[in-house]
Amino acid sequence: MRVIAEVPHERYKIQIFNYNSKYILKVELGQFEQVFKIGELDVNGIEDIQSMVTEELLENCLQRFISMRSDWEKSFSSKN
């Protein structure tokens, strides 16, 4: 798997990878990450994927990150 592009953003680390006939869009925030797999034949290259990284997508990612953090904190606190 190799990084083929990065999408600059002030809050997230956003990278696009190519692996096994798929593009992989990875959005990271702190210790959490979300991954979207897109078939190479479903888009017309990296530009299509970059155009899919909209404010709406990132806002939805933020909500999932908040939920992920909450789930993790609940799970981590219950280990004792």
Image: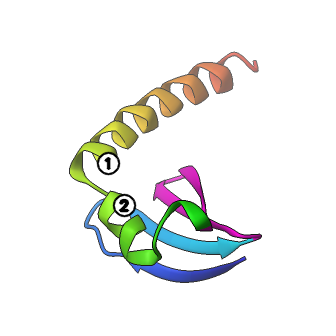
Task: Name the image colouring.
Answer: rainbow
Query: Does residue 2 appear left or right of residue 33 in this picture?
Result: right
- Which image quarter is the C terminus in? top right
- Which image quarter is the N terminus in? bottom right
Looking at the picture, tell me which residue is in the foreground, 55 or 30.
55
Disc 1 and disc 2 in contact, CB within 8 angstroms: yes
Residue found at x 22% / y 50%: 55
Q: Position of residue 42 (x, y in %)?
A: 54, 60
Secondary structure state at the residue bearing disc 2: loop
Amino acid under disc 2? Tyr
Name which quarter of the figure residue 48 lies in.
bottom left
Name which quarter of the figure residue 8 lies in.
bottom left
Q: Which residue is tagged 2? A: 12
Name which quarter of the figure residue 11 lies in.
bottom left
Is residue 21 magenta-colored? yes
Amino acid under disc 1? Leu
Q: Is residue 24 above or below residue 2?
A: above
Q: Position of residue 77 (x, y in %)?
A: 64, 21
Give the magenta part as a residue range.
20-40
Q: Position of residue 43 (x, y in %)?
A: 48, 65
Q: Is residue 19 above or below residue 38?
A: below
Name the front one of labels 1 and 2. Answer: 1
| Label at residue 58 | 1
In whole angstroms, how far apart are the C-alphas of marks 1 and 2?
9 Å
| First in sequence: mark 1 vs mark 2 | 2
